[in-house]
Image (cartoon, rainbow, N blue to C red):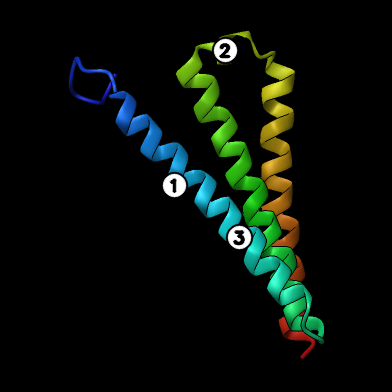
Amino acid sequence: RLPGTHQRPTNSMILAVYIMGVATVLLSVWAACAFARQRGALPRALSAQLLGEAVIGVGTLAFAWGAHSGSLTHWSPEFQSALRVTMFAATSLTTAHLVFTIRNL
């Protein structure tokens, strides 16, 4: 249900969320590949950061799909926690890598 209402999201709203999510993940991967082709520590660090962003996007899409399809209730707490840890690890490690790379320039 939408907050403050008794309405459920429409299929077109859910489809729009999935389209935007997939497009965002693809954009992150495309940009990461573009940076990976360049020389230097900073482009590599930016590439890693963008791949970490893509991991978060994939995880967010997985949770959105699980909630929409009703399968989220069948996911074990361990699986959900592992997915969240993966998402948090991807963003924290790639952010730390980027910070250290910039400090060392």
Residue drawn at x 53%, y 45% as measured from the top left: 22
Tag 1 residue: 20
Q: Distance of mark 3 from mark 2, alpha carbons? A: 27 Å
Task: Mark yes or no: residue 100 visible.
Answer: no
State if disc 1 and disc 2 touch (CB < 8 Å).
Answer: no
Task: Mark yes or no: residue 65 visible.
Answer: yes
Identify which amino acid the numbered label 1 is placed on.
Met
Dot in front, 2 or 1: 1
- Image position of 33 with respect to 53: above or below: below
Q: Which is more N-terminal, label 1 or label 3? A: 1
Q: Position of residue 42 (x, y in %)?
A: 74, 82
Identify which amino acid the numbered label 3 is placed on.
Ser
Left or right, 79 with reference to 21: right
Identify which amino acid the numbered label 2 is placed on.
Ser
Residue drawn at x 50%, y 11% as measured from the top left: 70
State if disc 1 and disc 3 touch (CB < 8 Å).
Answer: no
Nearer to us in this view, 43 or 99 = 43
Residues packed near mark 1 inside 10 Å, few (<14), some (14 to 19) or many (20 plus)? few
Q: Quadrant of residue 35?
A: bottom right
- Image position of 24 with respect to 84: above or below: below
Find the residue positioned furthest to the bottom.
105
Tag 3 residue: 28
- The kind of secondary structure element at disc 2 is helix
Tag 2 residue: 71
Q: Which is more N-terminal, label 1 or label 2? A: 1
